[in-house]
Image (cartoon, rainbow, N blue to C red):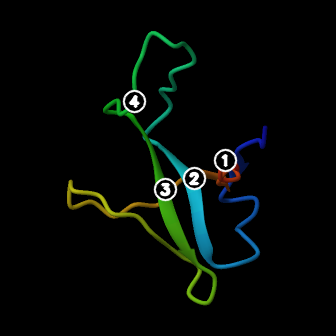
Amino acid sequence: MTEWIKCQDKTPENSGRYLVFKQKGEHRHQTAAYKYPHPCCKVNVAYYEKHFNKWEWNSFENEIIEPTHWMPLPEIPND
C-alpha cells in the first residue's frame, strides 16, 4: 500500500487524479470508530494541475480545498 505524502514535502510529478486528504487543525482520527466524512477531516479524489501547481477538488461546501496529503490512486481491478 502506498503511504500518504505531505503536500508541503512533495507534489505529484504529473497532472492527474490523486487521492487527497485534508486535515483541519490538529485533530486526527486514528480509529475505525469514526467514519468519513468527519467535520475535521476530508478524503476525496482531486485533480492536480502540474502547470499551475493547483489542486481541483469538487466540494459542495463552497470552500477552497488545499489538501495536506496525497497519494496515487490504486490500480483498477482486472477481473
Residue at which label 2 appears = 19
Q: CA distance from mark 1 to mark 2?
A: 17 Å
Q: Of the two numbered discs 3 and 2 on the same chain, state the one appearing first in sequence.
A: 2
Front residue (pair 41, 78): 78
Q: Position of residue 4 (x, y in %)?
A: 70, 44
Residue at which label 4 appears = 36
Q: Of the two numbered discs 4 and 3 on the same chain, state the one appearing first in sequence.
A: 4
Left or right of residue 58: residue 41: right
Residue at which label 3 appears = 45
- Nearer the observer, disc 3 or disc 1? 1
Front residue (pair 56, 1): 1
Q: Position of residue 43 (x, y in %)?
A: 47, 43
Q: Outermost residue toward the bottom?
A: 51
Mark 2: give few (<14), some (14-19) or many (20+) Cα within 10 Å.
some
Q: Of the two numbered discs 1 and 4 on the same chain, state the one appearing first in sequence.
A: 4
Q: Are marks 3 and 1 in contact (CB under 8 Å)?
A: no
- As helix, strand or loop, the secondary structure at mark 2 comes to strand
